[in-house]
Amino acid sequence: MQRLSIDDAGFEAAFARLVNARRDSDADVAQDVTDILRRVRDTGDAALVDYTLRFDNHRLGSDADWRVEAAECRAAYEGLSTELREALELAASRIRAYHEAQLPQNRDYVDDAGVRLGARWLPVDAAGLYVPGGRAAYPSSLLMNAIPAKVAGVERLAVVTPTPRGEVNALVLAAAHLSGVNEIWRIGGAQAIGALAYGTERIRPVDVITGPGNAWVAEAKRQLYGRVGIDMVAGPSEILVIADAQNDPDLIAADLLSQAEHDPTAQSILITDDASFAAQVEDCIDLQLISLKTGKTAKASWDDHGTMIVVDRLDQAVPLANRLAAEHVELAVADPDALMQGIRHAGSIFLGRMTPEAVGDYVAGPNHVLPTARRAGFASGLSVLDFMKRTSFIGLDRNALEAIGPAAAVLAHAEGLPAHARSIELRLKS
């Protein structure tokens, strides 16, 4: 775990290394993914059969081996305990309500020149959703991807999820039932992304692919962007907690470990204005790791990527936070709004001492699919807009063409495109 102080002579160099460090998988997966995608494109289902047997020890034979039917999803939902079903329903309802408020408005108006202008928002026809099934299975991830797609109006949702030895998480199936998923395919990895993008004998292609995955899944999405839309190329999870000494150190330690337990390459960072408080948090982390079920993963993350930064004043944390552009930023301070006003780069911000990031992962409402690896400097979290496209329209009558057409013809001639100019000028002369 790295300790930094803003007063140290080498702070700027050390902090720059922290900002620029890569935590993506060290494996050179690009060529492997290229080969997998080419084989899926060329041989379709045969490639999926081979890769699924090889990587998941699951043989794709009958229809039941390939797909999870709606009845199985419904049975999984009905089989949940009352407490778990109600929690899942609360999460789904809050996610749906938040994303319904994101729906964009169509525009249709006539400007001062008499030109009719506007735009229509329409959903894509089909979306593919990747749900991890390796290190852990996340029903929350399915809700966060499927519900915005349905709110956007997408008619066909195709889920792909690896099912090692044919086993699938019942909570994931229950979430699929709640979300209105149309298809669930028992395939994962880069080959599943390829199947969604290219289509195979069994699986029809989609227009957009979203959802988190391992390095091979992320690389497959990167390579296929352009053939299909994607949400983002996601890296390991990260959290930045800005906290003063008025917090319970045990709570802040838990917040930092909440992301460390995701993956050994996840990153947890604390910025505080009190060195003794930082030491207390560190002690609490050591104690919590002893009893944490995911302690091995969390410890590897904390040991290799955890960082504590001590500043003189909390307002010094704001420019540091903007350079880090973290996926999750907690402001565990007395006046979180004052700090939030200066934070320009963050995937999602959590305000106050009673707002742990984990609430945002499940039931708060905003999407938990967020930009990582400093991409919050230019990217946003998943929204309904990722499942929609905007089509503009223009309408002119003769008066409107006479008002703006000559200028367009002048510009067309200046660009050396006489046919463009002629298409306008002939109408003006007719």
Image (cartoon, rainbow, N blue to C red):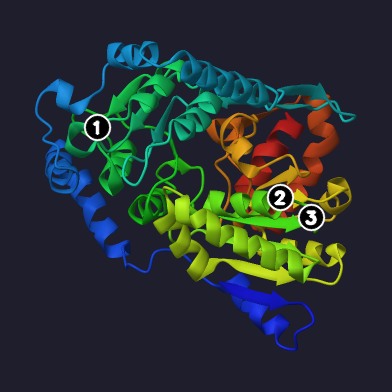
Q: Residues within 10 Å of mark 1 (few under 14, many from 20)?
A: many
Mark 3 and mark 1: Cα distance apart in space: 41 Å
Name the residue rendered at 30%, 48% in the picture.
Answer: 190
Q: Nearer the viewer, mark 2 or mark 1?
A: 2
In percent of width and height, residue 263 lies at 44, 55
Rendered-image quadrant of the N terminus = bottom right
- The residue tagged 3 is 343
Check disc 1 and report its element: helix, strand or loop.
Answer: loop
Q: Which mark is residue 330?
A: 2
First of labels 3, 1 by sequence position:
1
Q: Nearer the viewer, mark 3 or mark 2?
A: 2
Q: Vertically, is 403 above or below 253?
A: above
Q: Residues within 10 Å of mark 3 (few under 14, many from 20)?
A: some
Amino acid on which disc 3 is placed = Ile
The one of 264 and 200 positioned closer to us in this rendering: 264
Check disc 3 and report its element: helix, strand or loop.
Answer: loop
